[in-house]
Image (cartoon, rainbow, N blue to C red):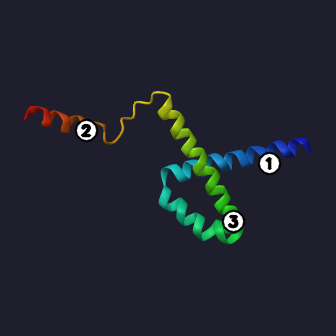
Amino acid sequence: MRKFLKIVSAVIFVFIIVGILFIKFDTPAAAEFTDNYLRPILGNQFVGFLEKIYFNLSDKAQQLTNKTGSTNIPQFADEGTESYQICGQF
């Protein structure tokens, strides 16, 4: 019985990792798969719950990378600097 639980846990873990990679690298196909296959089988409420978990975790991970000094530059940072330089020349 214990061996069976380990195998089931490993299979579920692999499915979760594959699902996350699928969503990350082919978002339109993942959305189509969700709408055409998962929603009819699992129902709207459960799929919505799974989406909520995924997007909340994704947002938290993004917030953590932004707080830890990621090299990502905000979208409007350069525009503000350039407009200041242009105004300063007049």
Residue 8: mark = 1
Q: Secondary structure at mark 3?
A: helix
Q: Amino acid at mark 3?
A: Gln
Q: Residues within 10 Å of mark 2 (few under 14, many from 20)?
A: few
Q: Secondary structure at mark 1?
A: helix
Q: Are marks 3 and 1 in contact (CB under 8 Å)?
A: no
Which percent across, then down, holds residue 76?
31, 41
Q: Amino acid at mark 2?
A: Gly
Q: Residues within 10 Å of mark 3 (few under 14, many from 20)?
A: few
Tell me which residue sits at (56%, 45%) in the image.
58
Tell me which residue sits at (67%, 72%) in the image.
40
Q: Mark 3, mark 2: which one is toward the viewer?
A: 2
70 to 37, vertically: above or below: above
- Nearest to N terminus: mark 1 or mark 2: 1
**Observer-nearest residue: 66 or 9?**
66
**Observer-nearest residue: 70 or 76?**
76
Quadrant for the C terminus in the image: top left
Q: CA distance from mark 1 to mark 2?
A: 53 Å
Left of 68 or right of it: where is 41? right
Q: Amino acid at mark 1?
A: Val
Which percent across, then down, holds residue 37?
63, 68
Q: How many marks?
A: 3
Q: Are marks 1 and 2 in contact (CB under 8 Å)?
A: no
- Nearest to N terminus: mark 3 or mark 1: 1
Left of 73 or right of it: where is 46? right
Q: CA distance from mark 3 to mark 1?
A: 24 Å
Image quadrant assignment for residue 17:
top right
Which percent across, then down, holds residue 36?
59, 70
Residue 45: mark = 3
Give the residue pinned by disc 2: 80
Quadrant for the N terminus in the image: top right
